[in-house]
Amino acid sequence: MDLLTLSFAVINGLLIGGIYGGVALGLSLIFGVMRVINFAHGSFLMLAMYCSYLLWASLGLHPYVSILATVPFLFIVGYFVQGVVISPLFKRERALVVEPTSALLLTAGVYLVVDNIVLMAFGPDVRSVAVDITYESIFVAGLPINLARLIGFLAAIVVAAALSFWLKHSEMGRAIRATAQNRDAASLSGINVQRVYNVTFGLGCAVLGLFGALLVPFFSITPNIGLSFGIKSFLVVVLGGIGSIPGSILGGLLLGVFESVASQFVTATSAAIFSFGLFIAILLLRPAGLMGRA
Amino acid sequence: MRHTLTLLLGGPLLVLALAIPLFVTDSYILHSIAMVLFFAYMASSWNFVCGYVGQLSLGHSAFAGVAGYVTVLLFTQLGVTPWLGMLAGGAFAALLSVPVGYATFRLKGPYFTLTTIAFAEILRIWLENTDDFLGIPLKGAQGLTVPPVGGSSFLAFQFDGKVPYYYIILAMLVGVMAATALMERSRLGFYLKAIRGDRDGAEALGVDPTRYSLTALAISAFLTGLGGAYYAQLFRYINPERNMGIDLSIDMAIMTIVGGQGTILGPTLGALLLHPIGEMVRATIGGSFLGLHLILYGLMLILAVIYFPKGIIVPLQRLLDGRARKSASRKAAAKTDALEGKGQ
Amino acid sequence: MSAIEKISEVKKILDVKGISKRFGGVQAVSTLSFHLNQGEILGLLGPNGAGKTTAFNMIAGALRSDTGEILFEGRSLANLKPWDICRLGIARTFQLSKPFGGLTVLENVMVGSFVRTAAEKEARAEAQKVVDFLEMGGKAHTDADDLTAFDRRKLELGRALATKPRLLLMDEVVAGATPNEAGEMVHLVRKVRDLGITILIVEHVMKVIMGLSDRVIVLDYGKLIADGPPKEVVRQPDVLKAYFGERYVDARA
């Protein structure tokens, strides 16, 4: 592989990796606060992509404009899913941390429902959004950089920074951080933990609303792409340290570059093997450190 | 008390199951019932380790697929009877499960689950993209077919009607339940439940969690492999998506969890409840609504986790136990009521 | 001194030689040495954070010691996993008793007895003996999840006894118990010792440990500051300062 191909692969990997990081932000936030791994994380991203697609196909809205709809919509979906589906678990477990497998099972149920509702509504066909930005590139040092990916990458950085800032300085953000540290103490000091959980879950999904819309210009969609995004997001947060926002972006960049370079050597379909392989390798090499908080 | 349900429910069910082919002659219906038994068998095999040790594997389809491939390839390439092929396939799956289990059982909760998915997906994607491996024709995503030998042949595991297939899977299901019952009463069963209850506590009582989890996993993989081989023989066709995709793993897990993990009858109960629902939806309105039955599965899973976290077998058990106890304890209850003054 | 020499003629069952443990910047235990004689009840005392539980966990194999070694009946416990240590004949209880849910009291105890036999019948018979020993026969078939906190504690002791240990490590035997329950537990621990089992107890409740132990050792900041009969140790100035000083007075107030 020559240097040009390699640098192209690395740049592409960084761009897509940033987006992976952005997509994983919600998973990390939700785990950090609620200690729940959301199995349906990728499905919510898929849902956002279909929303954006639908608005484009029916109303001709540019995906970037559809953000105005997808973000609030996904927030509501997340808020509702936590409030109705997941919160009974917390109520049952009272003061203890929710049993991780039950939460995983619940969200696996959500994954089945969401994926198959979309499958039912849209069928299994591959769909894509054709807008001008799909093909636009800028050149840096003679290398073409796809504009849509660059925008997605930058958005990930901005969202991560904004989220960190908001968590630190807003009242709700402080409540979220307090709940993450000690749910019972937070509850005793007057924080409405149920509401914090709802908002956290909604927020984690709202971020997916954004990235769903940013992804559709260059990413074809089918109803089953959610799971692989979900697993990649999990890998990203494991790489970057679960619960950490900058870690999420860093983990995304790592995965993106790894995947992009690895896929230079094999066909596109088998490239996924590398992500899964990396996932297993990472978990096996430092299981103790990872389980510390699980 | 615990075994009353197994006997009360299991006995009549078995008699009914044995008699079904006598009055069900429609081969489509018989096939459908055989499929219920197949899923009950697969769920029971999954339950053998996951239900007792309390970990959620979503990679079990890999064991089914691998064993299916071994069986089909041994038959088509070397002419080995699928009966032996099945055992070889099961053994191969058990062997495969040891390194996979050694790696994954150190992980907990979601880490374990996602790693099992990763293992199974690697295998599936590799198979889908491999037409030929060291001279063995795997035929990638297209899959393999088993050529018909013409007519019924016991040795070739090929039969004209559905009845033999039905009785084979029924026997397998009874076998897996018997194996589970034996395991429950053995040291292995006690140890698995101890690991599920409190891993540190179990370790302090002399239980090496990895060793016993692996033993159970290998047996479970073997049983799952037998099921996978049966599945391939029933349809005389195998491909990576269908026979080792994540959907099969999810089916096994959901049926067990809805029915009741860590019980002998739970997985079968789950299959009896869920598979017919799925089948009916598919047969009636499912044609125009792809995926509707999975939506129902998902909803059932959510409801079960919230309302019956130990499976629908628990309320059922309570019902039967309660009825049995009611007459016996009526006097005692009356006495207590009299003493406490029956308010409420 | 001659008294101590006499004691050391008795067989040492456990010999802890200079173990230490560091967590990040905290030296939880530093070069701790002590021993247990066959058949005695040794109390391990110390204020909160003195390193008692860390030392306890190192002996039980749940934590690895940074230095030194631990000998059980002359055999090093280095690199042994908790289950190996249990098979050697050391049993332990936990501060928080978690029964194995979904199993009855008898079945919980059977998990322990299975370490000495693979046969279900034999394990059941052994477990029944232990349940009777604990005077829990009436609750043998109760689901362990339905037990009271104190019964859980007794059950945990039973599980440990079922492994037929020669050394029993107990972490906080009467924490949270009512005076009556504490009395019952003390009675049980004595009964266990009468079986010939050597016992190491980590305990906060002073009254209990003073009445129960043949000998106590006191830890402070990870170091051994006293070793001797309960009544003598209480009088040592170091101990008074570290443990019985303000803290004891506060606790009584």
Image: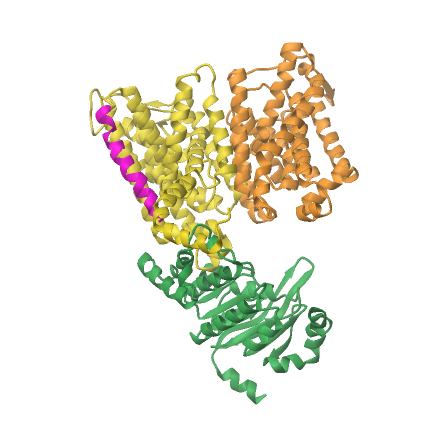
Chain colours: A orange, B yellow, C green
* Magenta region, residue range: B1-23
Q: Main secondary structure of the magenta part?
A: helix
Question: Where B129 falls versus B117 (above or below)?
Answer: above
User: Residue A24: where, in percent of width, then height?
Assistant: 64, 33
**Residue closest to the eye, C249 or A159:** C249
Q: As drawn, which residue projects farthest toward the right? A: A169
Nearest the camera: A216 or B167? B167
Q: Is residue A68 above or below residue C21?
A: above
Residue B172 in picture, x, y percent from top left: 29, 36
Q: Which quarter of the rendered picture does the N terminus of chain A lie within? A: top right
- Residue, x 52% and y 33% (percent of image)? A108
**Considering depth in this image, is C100 or B151 the residue closer to the camera?**
C100
A269 vs A145, left or right, is left
**Could you tell me how many numbered marks the image carries?**
0
Please report the residue visible at 55 percent of the width from the left and 58 percent of the height from the top: C96
Residue C89 figure quarter: bottom left
Magenta stretch holds residue B6: yes
Any magenta on residue B140? no
Residue C236 visible to an observer of this rendering: yes
